[in-house]
Image (spheres, helix red, strand yellow):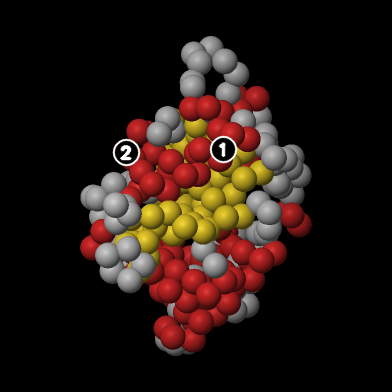
């Protein structure tokens, strides 16, 4: 008998449904991280969604062979997407010791120029920096994972975790992820260990005008709080007490 839930690779035609599902999952309950990376601009939800779909498809094509999207489909409901995960597998770390240089850091250019871009840029850098500074070795990275609200607590997270970690183990890779409060317990079941809590709290680096201050505070209301736990899993999932760990080898910088 065919299992009801099956893991399948994403195809190019899946991106509209995948992205719509991603938005719905991160809006139930609402997580500001969604809007940090996928904003609704000019109050145009549909236009912003289409931009996001195109961006995800383009990134998928450009980041081969490192990037893999997988979906968990419900075969009893027309193969609709019940869950999905975005895995990267790096046999050479994409992060270098120069990632902390100002010129090499991310700029949130998916926001229009101005205060919102300044805010988002600082938030993105604060969110990504701890993991990027520590993940200097070849590794797997679970970038995005979600389960649709109506399919939660049915074990679907185990399916996309087993799929990704099987590949990581075959390649001999350690693994990293940024966990929300909703996923930490699942990840611990698969051998991930908490490294640190990362609270994103952007602050302006200059005196703002009254209007700019209002725009900055609007960003805070829309996007914050953002707090995630950076988690690490050793290659093979076997943690050996006393063995060197990556975040001790490379100390974090301010």
Mark 1 crowd level (few <14, some 14–19, many ≥20, 10 Å Cα):
many
In front of the other: 117 or 157:
157
| Residue that appears at 54% across and 51% down | 87
Position of 203 relative to 11 (above/below): above
- In the rendering, which numbered label is found on residue 108? none
**Residue 215 can be seen in this image:** no
Viewer-proximal residue among 82 and 191? 82
Location of residue 201 in the rendering, given as x and y in whole percent from the top left corner: 46, 54
Q: Identify the residue position indicated by label 2 in the image.
A: 185
As displayed, is residue 184 above or below residue 85?
A: above
x then y, percent, for residue 148: 31, 62
Rendered residue at 50%/32% (across/down) = 233
Give the alpha-carbon distance from disc 2 to disc 1, as whole Å: 20 Å
In this picture, residue 5 sits left or right of residue 213: left
**Would you say 174 lies left or right of 201 here?**
right
Image location (x, y in percent) of residue 254: 61, 41
For discs 2 and 1, the disc positioned in front in the rendered view: 1
Labelled disc at residue 168: 1
Residue beneath the point at 61% across and 55% down:
67
Q: Residue at x 47, y 76 (%)?
A: 16
Residue sitting nearer the eye, 171 or 43: 171
Q: Is residue 3 above or below residue 51?
A: above
* Residue found at the far front of this picture: 1
Mark 1 secondary-structure assignment: helix
- Label 2, secondary structure: give it: helix
Against 193, residue 212 (above or below) is below
């Amino acid at each position: 008998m065919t299992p009801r839930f099956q893991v399948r690779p994403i195809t190019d035609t899946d991106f509209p449904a995948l992205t719509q599902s991603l938005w719905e999952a991160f809006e139930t309950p609402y997580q500001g991280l969604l809007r940090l990376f996928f904003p609704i601009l000019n109050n145009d939800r549909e236009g912003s969604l289409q931009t996001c779909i195109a961006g995800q498809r383009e990134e998928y094509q450009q980041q081969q062979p490192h990037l893999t999207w997988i979906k968990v489909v419900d075969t009893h409901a027309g193969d609709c997407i019940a869950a999905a995960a975005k895995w990267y597998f790096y046999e050479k770390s994409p992060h270098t010791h120069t990632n902390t240089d100002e010129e090499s850091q991310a700029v949130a250019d998916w926001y229009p120029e101005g205060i919102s871009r300044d805010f988002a840029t600082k938030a993105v850098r604060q969110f990504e920096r701890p993991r990027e500074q520590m993940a200097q070795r070849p590794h797997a990275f679970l970038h995005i994972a979600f389960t649709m609200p109506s399919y939660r607590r049915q074990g679907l997270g185990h399916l996309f975790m087993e799929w990704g970690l099987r590949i990581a183990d075959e390649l001999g890779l350690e693994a990293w992820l940024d966990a929300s409060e909703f996923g930490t317990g699942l990840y611990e079941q698969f051998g991930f260990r908490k490294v640190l809590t990362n609270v994103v709290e952007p602050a302006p680096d200059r005196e703002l005008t009254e209007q700019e201050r209002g725009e900055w505070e609007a960003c805070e209301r829309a996007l914050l709080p953002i707090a995630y736990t950076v988690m690490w899993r050793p290659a093979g999932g076997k943690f050996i007490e006393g063995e060197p760990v990556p975040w001790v080898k490379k100390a974090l910088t301010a």
